[in-house]
Amino acid sequence: MIFSPKELLLHSQKNKILKAWKLIAALAVIVILCVSIIVWASFHIMSNSMVEHSRKSSKELIKQTSKNIQTVLEQLDDFAMTVSRDNKLATYVLEYDNIEDEREKKQKLELIGEILSKYCKTREEIDHISIITKNNTHILNGLKQNLLNDLNIFDFDVQAFREGNKKSLWLSTHVSDFNSELSDSGKAKVFSIVKGIYSVSTLKSQETIIINIKESYLHDLIADIRLLNESNVFIIDGDGKYVMNARDKNLNGQPVEYDFTNEILDKKSGEDIREIDGKEYLITYNTIEDIKGTELKWTIVDMTPVSSIIKGIKIEMQNILFIGILCIVFGLIISTLITKVYDSNLDKRYIETHSIIMERERLATLGQMIGGIAHNLKTPIMSIAGGLEAIGELIDEYDNSIGDKEVTREDHHEIAADILNWVEKIKPYCVYMTDVISAVKGQTANLEDSTTLNFTVGELVKRVKILMSHELKKNKCQLNINVNVDENTTIKGEINNLVQIMNNLISNSIEAYNGNSGEIDLIFQQNNNNLEIAVRDYGCGIPDKVKEKLLKSMITTKGKKGTGLGLYISYSTIKGKFGGTIHIDSEEGRGTTITVVIPII
């Protein structure tokens, strides 16, 4: 077939357009695959990071909850000890068994009831107090009733308690159904502490007192404690039964339905990922062995669905992938339409060719941008993760300061303000993730606007002293602060970040003394236009093989107690947010000096 020059030109133009369309389609497929791979790879990396962070947070949460519950139970034990050592009560109970006259017995019962009522009124969490005399009479709220022949009350063997010479015993959650109409709680459940009654003149007790505490009191202690809204926190006893299930109190006193119960009771403390009914859960647990020497064996458990931990990232990643593919498909549709227009208007070859070239250039730029979307999202997502970690640490700081007389209300407000500040800093990153469509349309990628804040050395020193005073005192360590610069020296950045880093470094120095007392030096000095902040201890030091890796990867010298996150993240924060660096100088057995170097204004 012979073509005229004009036909050859048109045929050539069609071939070029067809090749261009095929090339664009091929590039679009490649870009879609690359974006998909990058998005999902990033998702898995960040998901694993969030799960590991949640492991640490959940472990600390459960440990602190265990300490809180142990403290409360110790207070209840003190209360029970006070009641059981009430000499007047002990005398009345002893005399009651020896009285023959029913009228006198009734009067004595009234006196006993008045004493028990008085004690109940002092503690609102007490449901009722009952007494079992040596003649097996059960006194409840000033009324009496005889025990059954087997001397059992809600699975509590009275005779075994007496013969075992036990001074006290904890009873897990049970229904107080022994003539429960005499109790204010009716059929409600209680947990109890049992003690022998002693008077000044008796060294051995045959009388027994049972302090019954309202189930709701234990529920209130753990109801609001959870890693996420989907988490379930519950307490189980050494027999594998629920002491308290915050979600369903009807399960209290019933056997725990999970297969892993015996395993966590044996391990006593830790965290695991378990699959339950086809769904993965992060399970964190810690056991309270005893209360002032009396066996307890209560295990506090937190169950959090792994899917809820990574839900936010998963949704955002799916949105990004969808938006990327949508934009590419939209580009392909536009290319197809343009190609058809070119094909039907070949007389305007110059304009059409120019348009095609411009469109190719735009699509190429668009393809490059979409390929970088996943990479750009790492910054806000990691910033959010870092912000959440900082918030978690501030919450722990706040929680640990509760009850500390040295920490004032203003200090609490300051910590709360720091938390709010972190929340405000996280918001721009979340907004950025929703602005991806606008970024693609404009063919540019906007980096999040950095917030410029300034603070002084004096402000930094003040906050570090306030926030670390309790931990230093608790561990019998002394912090020597030596400021060799003007306290009005200005640092560019956010003070909360640097305060948290300083607290982390000082905490590491405290741990370097392995529970012993010691001195820690905090030194500020200026070197040219840089501020050098050195934290020095004289503890165990860091092995050389570990020291070389500290700032390159998440490695720890604390064994199972450490994660390696602290110093690694501190270094990343100093480098990324302050434009500085960290130096480590350590000699094993002699101590460690960690120097933070940041530019000053």
Image (cartoon, rainbow, N blue to C red):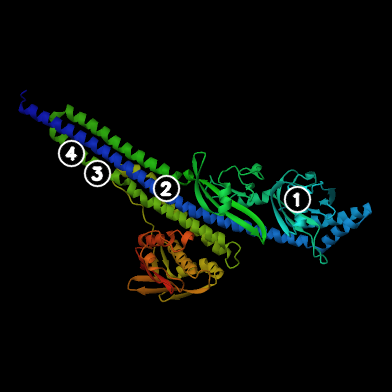
Q: Are marks 3 and 2 in contact (CB under 8 Å)?
A: no
Residue matched to label 1: 157
Where disc 1 sits, the SS reads strand
The answer to whether residue 185 is above or below residue 61 is above
Q: Nearer the viewer, residue 419 or 97?
A: 97
Where disc 3 sits, the SS reads helix
Q: Which quadrant, please, contains the C terminus?
A: bottom left
Q: In the picture provided, is 428 more to the left or to the right than 202?
A: left
Q: Disc 4 to disc 2, how far (Cα)?
A: 41 Å
**x, y percent for residue 44:** 39, 46
Q: Disc 3 to disc 1, how far (Cα)?
A: 80 Å
Residue 365 shows which numbered tag? 3
Q: Nearer the viewer, mark 4 or mark 2?
A: 2
Please, what is the three-letter code of the amino acid marked with disc 4? Ile
First in sequence, mark 4 or 3: give its number.
Answer: 4
Residue 47 shows which numbered tag? 2
Q: Does the rendering let one see residue 34?
A: yes
Q: Nearer the viewer, mark 1 or mark 2?
A: 1
First in sequence, mark 4 or 1: give its number.
Answer: 1
Please, what is the three-letter code of the amino acid marked with disc 1? Asp
First in sequence, mark 1 or 2: give its number.
Answer: 2
